Amino acid sequence: MSLTRYQNFVDGRYLANASGEYFEVINPASGAVIYEVEVADEAVQTAAIASAQQGFALWSAMSGVERGRILLRAVALLRERNDILAAIEVADTGKPWQEASVVDVVTGADSIEFFAGLAAAIEGNQQQLGADFYYSRREPLGICAGIGAWNYPLQIACWKAAPALACGNSMIFKPSEETPLGALKLAEIFIEAGMPAGVFNVVQGDGRIGAWLSQAPEVAKVSFTGEVGTGKKVMRAAADTLKGVTMELGGKSPLIIFDDADLEEAVSAAMVANFYTQGEVCTNGTRVYVQQGIYPAFMARLLARTRDNIRVGDPMDPATNFGALISRDHQRKVLDYIRIGQEEGATLRCGGEALRPAMAPNGFFVAPTIFSECRDEMRICREEIFGPVMSVLSFEQEEEVVRRANDTALGLAAGVFTRDIRRAHRVVHQLQAGICWINSYGASPAEMPVGGFKQSGIGRENGLATLQHYTQLKSVYVGMQAMQSPF
Ligand code: NAD
């Protein structure tokens, strides 16, 4: 049986490439090739730029109310097709249906809904300067490029498209080559919702296509989600034409649990922050700092709940709450880190191996893994693993844990569990992280800006703050009197 081969989506339709080059997409839970995708060759790239230029001209000339109305229609279609889209995400990523059916499409739609509502409210200001005055306009940038990672493919596409399009820009989006289908479905939905052709285009391929987009002189801005190292390459490429960049990069985030925390909730947070989406979440709290007094009780409950409550299996089974890693290579990388942790002297308390569940024996599964007696200098506590590997560390004092939590070049997220409200705020105010949770972990509603400190990122996604990143301010001085001149 021949597989479906998807093309690039340019100017409102699927466009065949000339080179014939394509790549295969694998379902991580079955190990099987599920479809093929054409690479955006030079002809497609040229067409995508021309299309996005035309799309920009049409879209930026529309009023904010009109743009918002079209975006809201897309939101309705996304919600209507939740189950089909969620199934695509499960097949592409290996994550459980339990998650994808209630989070991935919903959070993507929420973001578009949030920015659709703001599209008509983007405004400049004005000020009187004696008889003269000035006013300012918030203008769109032009063509924005979006480059996505594979862990939340559709959500990432929505989070990038939503503010860019609400502000009147057009977009060329490149999904990860591991998970290319969700963005194509979003492009179809935008057209169905009445968006002019060329406003949202999807080009496919690996890093070569991302590199082309990052340097393309016609592109005004790049919004990137991925690894820190790749983000640096994108910034270097963007520097030649001084493009604006938004960088959503990796983390090695601390989750700090004080003696007075609610034990069950703290254990819930540690599990969510390490095992949700098989640990493939950028904001994961992988360094779990537990104060000495609660350490033994915390470990006992954590191990018991991990043993009793995690159900690994076919991700489409509604009972499964822990799926497969994205690829064979990634599975190998995560297992390598587990070996390194053991060699470094951390105590392996559970997991630590590849799994072959009966219903998905060829998938890329790694068991939920917990190390205790970890030390800050261990590689498993310093490097992003992006898999289900939790490192538990103990601490005594508040000041000590803040210092240790901040001792990293990354600064994406952090969590604090305590019943002492003053301590909670005091600690998060000192943590060098762009997203902090108090007595909670992982929630990221569309209203809340998210992004990283230090090498975890630049700029923000979601929330009002993001409008700044997709518009530029133009000041207009208006002389109301005869102009003075010394000449
Ligand atoms: P990656 O950096 O390998 O790839 C990301 C994207 O960049 C892909 O589309 C890839 O094709 C493209 N790319 C590769 N080389 C490129 C180049 N030279 N120029 C331009 N584009 C290039 O990351 P990944 O493995 O897909 O995703 C996992 C990483 O993403 C983790 O580090 C994770 O923390 C991070 N992430 C961050 C956030 C966030 O919001 N901060 C969200 C999700 C994932």
Image: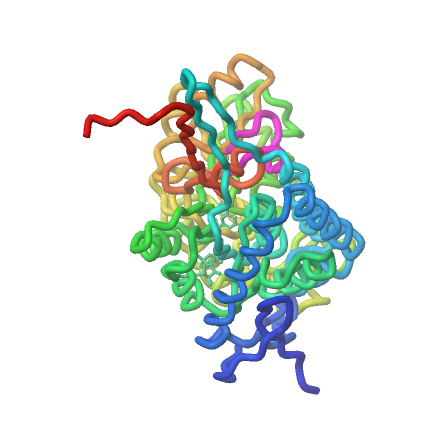
Identify the residue at image location x=41%, y=41%.
Answer: 458
Q: Residue 137 placed where, x, y %?
A: 49, 35
* In front of the other: 86 or 108: 108
Chain part drawn in magenta: 435-451
Report the side of 55 relative to 343 (left or right): right
Is residue 427 placed above or below 436 in the rendered structure?
Answer: above
Q: Residue 374, located in which quarter of the rendered image? A: top left
Q: Residue lying furthest right in this view?
A: 80
* In front of the other: 207 or 433: 207
Identify the residue at image location x=71%, y=66%.
Answer: 358
Q: Residue 100 placed where, x, y %?
A: 70, 53
Q: Residue 464, located in which quarter of the rendered image? A: top right
Q: Quadrant of the C terminus?
A: top left
Q: Quadrant of the N terminus?
A: bottom right
Q: Residue lying furthest left in this view?
A: 487
Report the side of 18 relative to 63 (left or right): left
Is residue 228 placed above or below 189 in the rendered structure?
Answer: above
Q: Residue 77 placed where, x, y %?
A: 77, 54
**Figure disc tally:** 0
Colour theme: rainbow
Identify the residue at image location x=48%, y=83%.
Answer: 19
Predominant secondary structure, magenta span: loop
Observer able to see residue 350: no
Q: Residue lying furthest bottom in this view?
A: 1
* In front of the other: 90 or 329: 90
Identify the residue at image location x=51%, y=15%.
Answer: 423
Q: Residue 109 placed where, x, y %?
A: 69, 47
Observer able to see residue 182: yes
Is residue 321 placed above or below 325 in the rendered structure?
Answer: above
Report the side of 341 relative to 60 (left or right): left
**In magenta segment, residue 359:** no
